[in-house]
Amino acid sequence: MDRMFTWLASRMASAAGQPLAFIIAVALIVVWAVSGPFFHYSDTWQLVVNTSTTIVTFLMVFLIQNAQNRDGAAMQAKLDELIRALEGARTPFIGIEHLTEKQLEEIRHALEKECDQEPDPKRSGASVVDRLLERR
């Protein structure tokens, strides 16, 4: 089931992001608008476009969210591999996407502060960032 949904979500999200999909959507709206006088701008005529756009929007939210979740997870895995592979990189940064928003903000602030300071060769022990990461 997951594999089938992933395949479908990928294809649909990819198709929806193409210029042709936009052109088709605009063409459908133009056809609907032009057909207004034929249907005397009735409530049913209005309901058709309202219902159609609501259903399409509702379904697309799930497909796009699925595609973004997969893309985000893949990017995190790639970044984690880069951190792991780079000599001198701080491997405790692997997996920090699972921390709370507050913890991430503290780490970001500490990194900015650390970048503003000149390295002190006399300084020993854990950095601010290392101490923040140990709180996990």
Image (spheres, grey):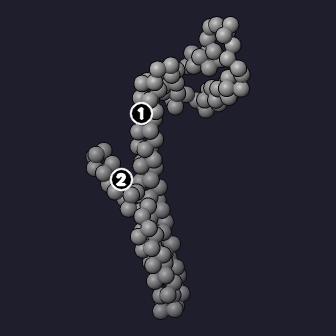
**Residue 10, numbered label:** 2
Along the line of sight, which residue is nearer the eye, 9 or 80?
A: 80
- Residue 16: mark: none
Name above or below for residue 86 compared with residue 24: above
Residue 2: x, y in percent? 30, 44
Question: Which residue is depicted at the point 38% across and 62% down?
Answer: 15
Q: Residue at x 55, y 28 (%)?
A: 99
Task: Please state if 115 lies on the left or on the right of 69 as rendered.
Answer: right
Q: Amino acid at mark 1?
A: Ala
Image disc number at residue 77? 1
- Residue 76 drawn above or below residue 5: above
Rendered image quadrant of residue 25: bottom left
Residue at image point 42% right, 33% down: 77
76 or 57: which is nearer to us?
76
* Front tag of 1 and 2: 1
Disc 2 residue type?
Ser
Q: Residues within 10 Å of mark 2 (few under 14, many from 20)?
A: some
- Disc 1: CA contacts within 10 A as few (<14), some (14-19) or many (>=20): some
Residue 33, placed above or below residue 121: below
Give the mark nearer the N terminus: 1 vs 2: 2
Q: Quadrant of the C terminus?
A: top right
